[in-house]
Image: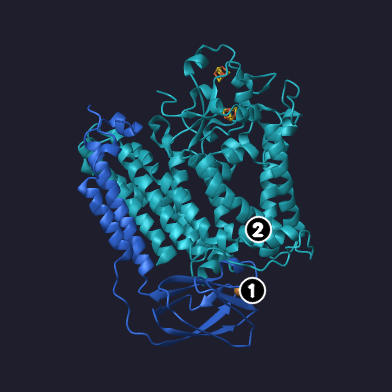
Chain colours: A blue, B cyan
Amino acid sequence: MTRPPSPLSMRPRPIWVLFGLVTFAVLVAPLPGAAGAATREIALDATQFEFAPGRVHVNRGDRVVITLTASDVVHGFYLDGYGLERRVEPGITEQIAFTADKPGKFRFRCAVSCGPLHPFMIGELIVERNTPYWRAVGVVLVAAAGMLVHLWQSGKTRSSQEVINGTG
Amino acid sequence: MLNEGRFDLLARAPLLKRMLQARAFQPALMLATLAVFTLAILTGLAGTPAGSRNFGIIFVWIVWWALLIVVLVPFFGRFWCTVCPVPAPGEWLQRRAIVQRGPARPWTRGLRWSRRLKNMWLQNLGFLGVAVFSTIILTRPNVSALVLLGFLLAGVVLSALYKNRVFCRYVCPVGGFIGLYSLLSPVELRVADPDVCADHKTKDCITGNEAGYGCPWMVFPGNLTRNVYCGLCFECLKTCPKNNIVLNLRPFGSDLMVAKERRLDEAYKAFIMLGCALLYSVVLLGPWGWLKGWANMESLPHWGLYALGFVAFNLALLPGFFWLAVWGARRMTPARQPMRRLFVDYAYTLIPLGLAAWIAFSVGFVLVNGSYALSVLSDPFGWGWNLFGTADAAWTPLGATLIPFLQVGILTAGLLLALNTAYKIARQHHAHHRPAFLAALPVSGFALITTLGFLRLYLG
Ligand code: SF4
Ligand code: SF4
Ligand SMILES: [Cu+2]
């Protein structure tokens, strides 16, 4: 079994350059945006221990107006990524308005201790196109493909012993 | 062969060796953790029922949990077992000593542990048993405290009945998964030269001598090839008169390749851990209130359904899908090993995947709720104390924008290690590259789909 030259003296194989480029493309390529911006009014009700609706979809650029109510005890609303926070008491309606200018999934969480499952009182705001998600899927697929190519190439010339011990 | 490609830590760091050899090392750390553990039980029983204001909940399920799953298990293997307070009272009663070596015969009935229980099945069932109640345990300080107390008492009772740390080795549900995931850790305790052990008549590491006790985990260091059952208590480092014990640094995941010790109980541990990470991500971090209600025992029939589904998913559904993948792998190649052998072997692919999933899941709530630790430190019982002036620290979710990126990175790393493992395991069954590569594909696909499932839950 001949030893391959040290990685430092090797010129990068074209295949790895290709994977690098694909990963880069997955991370920065402009993905098609969602439909034009609009104003979205959302009625959101908080009860122990859920928000209804639990998943809210808006488009990037939308003006989002949330009408927040609580129908049992005092709850709160904290939106990840946007840092918005509000307290809501039963019987009093709160309005939260913001522009959904960041794409992705953002959890909203109860921000006022309201009972045992309070830390898990979580809803989801999805700002479409959810580009971070699709990029993450892309990264995982490219990484997996890269690993398979690496295993295919590096395994061809090595004995099982060498593969298992990571030598050769 | 043994210790090849290893970095002998103790030879390079004599100070570390002296410290680990000191008889006071382990009890000192255990006393410290026992103090925190006792406080967690007391606050849980006597403190406020509001979990986020209770030291018991926050320090066990956020601070300790994060430390365990993000730092200790992936990087130091079973080091938690070195310092764990749970077996301490039982072990000290058994030995009638804490630091110096006590009277020759330990105080215990010395019953024999049933052969049929010398495996991980009790730990598997125990973990599932705790898991179906976890929504209650995680959020009710008094229930949580009773569970911790139950662990402690079980440790004492088993120490009184049986020799050694039977509780840690065969019963503790936490010990089970720490052991499984310690296969991955870059630290290992081994012997420098197995031949020295083979020639050593008295085998002090088993019998004990004036310097220390025989291995409390019922392990013979001379045979160690994996981390699973060595509790890193360092007794053998103290007792071995031949200076044959070493502590090595090594590549991540080395133990996954030790083929002859793979077993069905450990494979199931891998399924259960992966399955629970997935289900917890759905139930606790998901947006489905009704499901939280079921898990929260708001009605007993609903909880019953939930528990049934939970157990069925872990014991039947997930292993069933995996079985199909392995069946596909078997069809793909001419060499036909027994199905059971392949099923058990390939299940070790899920160990890196499962640990990554647990870290990603934990990152999802630990950072966001970490700030509670400040306030409960000043007011552990929630009685209005303010010991360090931090009692009124507001809830400040940390890293909310960073979390998804961390999760993607961790899951990707776990997947890559899993793919690598699948191929290597396949090469253990096939001398040649091509059939091995093909045989690894279905299992790799399973790992990829699982990872995409987690992405969907966390980012989609
Ligand atoms: S006492 Fe040391 S040399 Fe003897 S069998 Fe145990 S580890 Fe090996
Ligand atoms: S092998 Fe050594 S360090 Fe491991 S549990 Fe036994 S005595 Fe402790
Ligand atoms: Cu609430």
- Identify which residue is drawn at 39% across, 87% down: A38
Camera-nearest residue between B51 and B332? B51
Q: Secondary structure at mark 1?
A: loop
**Which residue was labeled with disc 1?**
A112
Q: Residue at x 73, y 24 (%)?
A: B101
Eyeballing the image, is B360 above or below A42?
A: above
Which residue is drawn at the image coordinates 33% and 58% (left, top)?
A139
Instruction: Identify the image quadrant of residue A9.
Output: top left
Residue B449 visible in the shown view? yes
Which quadrant of the view contains residue A133? bottom left
To which chain does the residue with label 2 belong? Answer: B
| Tag 1 subunit | A
The local secondary structure at tag 2 comes to helix
Q: Which residue is denoted by mark 2 in the rendering?
A: B58
Query: Of the residues shown, which amino acid type is indicated by label 1?
Result: Val
| Residue A28 in the image, given as x and y percentages of width and height | 32, 65
Image location of residue B278, percent across then percent down: 45, 57
Ligand 2 location (quadrant): top right
Task: Identify which residue is drawn at 52% across, 56% down.
Answer: B362
Q: Specify the quadrant that holds the N terminus of chain A.
A: top left
Ligand 3 within 8 angstroms of badge 1 C-beta: yes
